[in-house]
Image (spheres, rainbow, N blue to C red):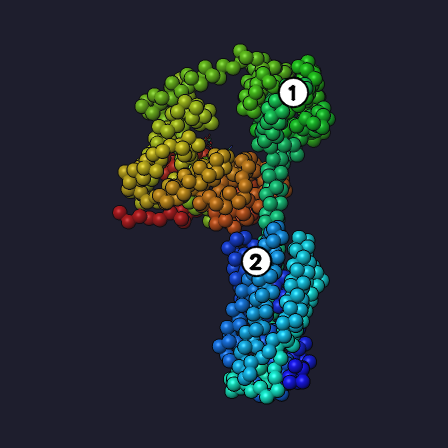
Amino acid sequence: MPQDLLVVRHDGVAMTAAWFLAVYAIYVMTLVIRRVRASDRDVGIGWWIGGALTVGTGIWAQSFISMLSRQLPIQVGYLPAIVLAAWLPAVLICAVLIWSVSRVHQPVFKRVLSGLLAALGFGFLTYLNVSAMVLQPEVAWDPAWLLVAFAVILVGNVLASVMLRRELLREAKFLNQAGVAVVLGSALHLAQLLMLESAGVQEGTVCLSAQQLSGTYLDWLVSLIGGILLMGVQLGTVLDTRLRRQHAQLVSSLQQAQTDLQVAAHRDALTGLLNRPGFEHHLREVIQSLDESGEAPAGRLAVMRINLDGFRALVNTYGHALGDNLLRQVAKRLLVLVRNTDAPARGDGEEFLLLLPNMPDQHAVAQLAYRIGLAVSQPCVINGEDVTITCSIGIALYPDSVTVEQLICHANEAMLAASKAGGGVYCLHEAGMDISGAKQVEMQRELRYAIQRGELALHFQPKLDAVRGGLVGVEALLRWTHPQRGPVSPAEFIPVAERFGLIGELGQWVMNEACRHMRLWLDAGLEIPVAVNMSAHQLREHDLESRIRETLARHALPADMLILEITESVAMDDIEASLKVFDMLDRIGVKLSIDDFGTGYSSLSYLRRLPARQLKIDRSFVRDLDHSADAQAIVEAVVRLSHALGMTVVAEGVETEAQRQVLVKLACDELQGFLFAKPMADSDLRTWMGSQTVPMAPLHLVPA
Ligand code: C2E
Ligand code: MG
Ligand code: MG
């Protein structure tokens, strides 16, 4: 009965503050919801809980200020326990709201349910606030007003949740978020006012808790606390968003750098053509797409190997500059003759490769080979003089040769046949040419006895500190001197040993021999770490760990004096398997080195996961360093990347002083190459060390 009720005075400033706090709290909630959605599971849960606690505190503060803004003409106070208890529903409401809205694709009934829960929570919160004021007689609630208040909060909730859902599915915009905040914040505030309005206080009522929590500045204090908390969270969301953006930018620029590196790594710096790894990569892609399409190629696919006859002799007589000039001119002539779809490349040394997809027939391939031979044999004008050179061309055709390896190998055999025929001709691969199979069987038979007959030996190539010039270690390289044929290159017999299952025995011999030498040097007072090359097959041996441990123990060596070199392509071939082996080797304590870096297709993220301590830049990059800005850029990028990942960098194949200077400038850590020393036997190594003027700084004298 209105005439029995006390007249309530409204404090406009406190009411505005409460409204503002409601809107601000909801605004911060929209920011938190975005963070929950943008983060991964654990961080998202952190944002959800933290957001619910702070935004809930804001809502709790706001509803208390709403209460304080209604001033009764009697002295009132609030029971602190109930005021504090009201904090819990406020936090729970926010938790429910954040959870339900952040799941944009939730079914409608779940959204309605959480809306209802939130509305009931708000009602309960206001009820608790009113109850904190212990009045005698109790307040009389007007059900009609209560219903209206409930409807307002429900409608506000639904409206805001629809707006928020649409907003979340798009890019974050301040105006959208502010709109949601104004709608839901105002609905919340209005519903609270309506509820408070429905709580009639009769004339003659006394407040039994008048001596409890009260005070003139209570509303300001509560607003301040709520506001500061919300501001803290807002700042957190802004920082988090910025950090995430920076992280995303970093990831994308790393990916870009990786792509650039790969593109650059597949180019030959001297001629601008693809290099050999780039050619093989491209050929592999083309063959793969042919195999996947399952159709016979419309025309024929051919691979050519073009070798310049007598090039070495020319270079030896007239120098490298002439050789480089000649290679560039041949490359230009090739480019004139090929189609856009063909892929010309520079192979090793004086060799070019050519991939010809979709050739009409074998005759067309032969015609092109003839024209290339003719073009190459036209005189080149170098320094005003005519230089004439011919070429031997070998051709392999798909699908006579099916795999990448077969195509390249068969083209090589054909090229050798053309060369043997005197050069200046082309030759198609034929089945009869494949004598290498028989040769390999012969070689593996002889290799089996090589260890017993003492035909194998280890040579050691020094690695020097790039700045100080002192010896930092050696790489052990296997040598086989065949009784009749003389020295056989490891590049020739290691693949045979791998193919015929001999590499395990060979590898074990190398490791034992390397450790034996290390022990001999140690006994002589020299601490020289040795790097041993490992092949892919060795990595897969089940007893690798025990054999390494046994060998180290047999020679009483600390594990960190042994370095294992694993080529990049092997390390990256089956990355998960490599990781397991690498971790095992790392546990033993031996150091790991990635050999021939730049020839494989490393992913930066994988490289980061490998526990390698050292990276060796392949000599194909070092070769072009003194005249190619591209090669310098690649080496510089690799050095920076390695240092960032905590690895030292060794440059392989340093042959000239100019290369050394560039490498030192690019902050390369260690150098290895013919400029300093070729691989040599133990006795020669000791003589070499004695002849060095630079002190062997990193070597430690071991007490006898
Ligand atoms: P790698 O591990 O990359 O070894 C470096 C190769 O570069 C060696 O060839 C070395 O003689 C050569 N080299 C060093 N400095 C220069 C230079 O300034 N210019 C030039 N042009 N070459 C230089 P090598 O001894 O013929 O070995 C070839 C490959 O055979 C090695 O490449 C390695 O992958 C493999 N290999 C050698 N010994 C072993 C072994 O014991 N086990 C296994 N699994 N592989 C081995
Ligand atoms: Mg090596
Ligand atoms: Mg190497």
Residue at image coords 50%, 46%: 608
State whether residue 447 is above or below residue 43: above
Residue lying at 26% horizontally and 47% vertically, measured from the top left: 704
Q: Are marks 2 and 1 in contact (CB under 8 Å)?
A: no
The answer to whether 45 is drawn above or below residue 152 in the figure is above
Kind of residue indicated by mark 1: Pro
* Residue plotted at (58% across, 16% down): 400
**Which label number is shown at residue 297?**
1
Residue type marked 2: Trp
- First of labels 2, 1 by sequence position: 2
Does any portion of residue 27 appear in the rendered image?
Answer: no
Q: Quick check: is the Cβ at mark 1 less than 8 Å away from ligand 1?
A: no
Task: Tell me the CA gap for discs 2 and 1.
Answer: 57 Å
Element type at marker 2?
helix
Q: Which mark is residue 229?
A: none
- Give the farthest residue toward the top: 432
- The outermost residue toward the left is 704
278 sits left or right of 493 in the view = right
Residue at position x 65%, y 81% from top?
A: 1
Query: Residue 278 in the image: x percent, y percent?
Result: 60, 32
The image shows residue 254 at horizontal and vertical percentages of 59, 47
Residue at the spot of label 2? 99
Q: Is residue 55 above or below residue 209?
A: above
Q: Nearer the viewer, residue 451 or 656?
A: 451
Residue 426 is drawn in which quadrant? top right
Where on the picture, by quarter, is residue 346?
top right
Circle 1 sits in a helix, a strand or a loop, which is it?
A: loop
Q: Position of residue 63 (x, y in %)?
A: 60, 73
